[in-house]
Image (cartoon, rainbow, N blue to C red):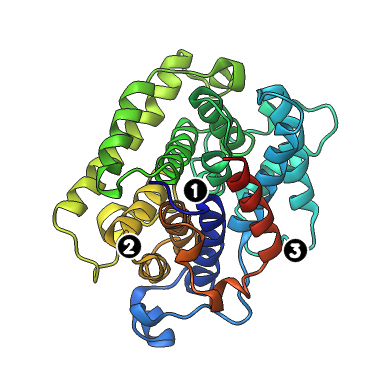
């Protein structure tokens, strides 16, 4: 059975994780615990401010909503509104939460009139800035698997054009989708492996155009296969961590610190899978880590909320999360349509 209101749960969860990890990013576990106490007691800051992770998730969500109001989702309907939302975010005075250089550089080029989006794509960057914002594509109902995959990769390519960024974004959206549809968390790593295997050489040309040529790849298949192979490799590390799970150990020691796309996915999954029925602990574990703590907790929250639904989160936290009304509005839209 699917969770009650999984889209709302996921949108709230990602923002809560983001806010919880905001003050702990760039710090060691020892420093975090010395400042805030034991990791299992981390409390949501006051005020509960989010980072660019949630801001860009909302930008993608708004762009996706606009695109889906105008018929079937295609690259032609998705790219213009998402591009504009990313530009608006780049220009906003609220864009002051230590955003990544890849997003800033790409959005500057996207803002130049007449420039094709592929000119903005940073094909050498596989930072986690693309897959930490992709949850809306796992939550929006009515999409085919091909639409979801193509759109997840395109939204990544607008900023992060490395094949691993594309594959990790696609895989993240698929994980959110599976959980929202009621997949057993214990089966999730196997289901993701099956997805990697089935898509390894699938290049979505109708969504990505000639991106592979801009990246200097030998062929479109070779381009995208590289990204899926790196995702498969980090799933191996996730499987190894889950064979001997240790909730008290920094998840970054097992799967990487999460600054890059595939490691962020694996670390977010590990935090969630260590505590599949205890979402607050999953967020706290991600936030108390030596890596990209806001993004790891953000991803863990997206997964946990999709699995458990809107009621998973403490009301005392959700009542004061930044952008609460917009998070609820997008979640309610997609839950109602589902």
Task: Identify the residue under disc 1.
Answer: 128
Q: Residues within 10 Å of mark 1 (few under 14, many from 20)?
A: many
Q: Quadrant of residue 288?
A: bottom left
Residue at the image point whose x is 44% and y is 33% from the top: 167
Does residue 302 appear left or right of residue 211 in this picture?
A: left
Does residue 245 appear left or right of residue 208 in this picture?
A: left
As drawn, the label of residue 252 is none
Does residue 92 appear left or right of residue 54 in this picture?
A: right
| Frontmost residue, 67 versus 207 | 67
In the image, residue 219 lies at what x, y percent?
A: 46, 13
Task: Identify the residue under disc 3.
Answer: 94
Task: Residue 209: tell me if it is visible.
Answer: no
Q: Earlier in the sequence, mark 3 or mark 1?
A: 3
Outermost residue, top side = 219
In the image, residue 236 lies at what x, y percent?
A: 23, 41
Q: Earlier in the sequence, mark 3 or mark 2?
A: 3
Compute the Cα span from label 3 to label 1: 20 Å
Task: Identify the residue under disc 2.
Answer: 277
Compute the Cα span from label 2 to label 1: 25 Å
Q: Quadrant of residue 233?
A: top left
Residue at the image point whose x is 69% and y is 30% from the top: 78
Q: Residues within 10 Å of mark 2 (few under 14, many from 20)?
A: some
| Frontmost residue, 209 versus 316 | 316
| Frontmost residue, 42 versus 162 | 42
Q: Tell us which disc is closer to us: 2 or 1.
A: 2
């Amino acid at each position: 059975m699917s969770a009650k209101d999984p889209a709302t749960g996921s949108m709230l969860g990602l923002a809560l994780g983001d806010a919880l990890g905001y003050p702990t990013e760039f710090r060691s576990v020892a420093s975090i615990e010395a400042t805030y106490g034991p990791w299992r007691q981390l409390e949501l800051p006051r005020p509960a401010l989010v980072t660019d992770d949630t801001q860009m998730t909302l930008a993608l969500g708004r762009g996706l909503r606009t695109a889906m109001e105008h018929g079937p989702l295609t690259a032609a309907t998705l790219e213009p509104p998402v591009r504009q939302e990313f530009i608006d975010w780049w220009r906003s005075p609220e864009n002051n939460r230590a955003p990544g250089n890849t997003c800033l550089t790409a959005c500057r080029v996207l803002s130049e009139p007449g420039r094709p989006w592929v000119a903005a794509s940073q094909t050498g960057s596989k930072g986690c800035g693309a897959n930490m914002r992709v949850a809306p594509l796992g939550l929006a109902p009515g999409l085919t698997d091909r639409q979801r995959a193509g759109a997840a990769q395109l939204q990544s390519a607008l900023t992060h054009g490395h094949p691993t960024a594309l594959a990790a974004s696609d895989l993240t959206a698929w994980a959110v989708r599976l959980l929202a549809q009621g997949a057993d968390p214990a089966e999730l790593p196997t289901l993701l492996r099956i997805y990697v295997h089935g898509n390894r050489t699938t290049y979505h040309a109708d969504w990505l155009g000639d991106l592979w040529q801009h990246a200097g790849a030998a062929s479109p298949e070779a381009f995208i296969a590289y990204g899926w192979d790196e995702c498969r490799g980090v799933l191996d590390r996730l499987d190894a961590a889950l064979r001997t799970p240790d909730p008290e150990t920094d998840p970054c020691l097992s799967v990487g610190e999460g600054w890059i796309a595939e490691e962020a996915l694996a670390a977010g999954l590990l935090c969630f899978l260590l505590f599949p029925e205890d979402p607050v602990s999953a967020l706290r574990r991600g936030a108390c880590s030596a890596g990209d703590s806001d993004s790891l907790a953000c991803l863990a929250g997206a997964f946990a909320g999709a699995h458990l639904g809107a009621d998973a989160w403490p009301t005392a936290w959700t009542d004061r999360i930044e952008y609460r009304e917009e998070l609820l509005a997008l979640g309610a839209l997609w839950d109602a349509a589902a």
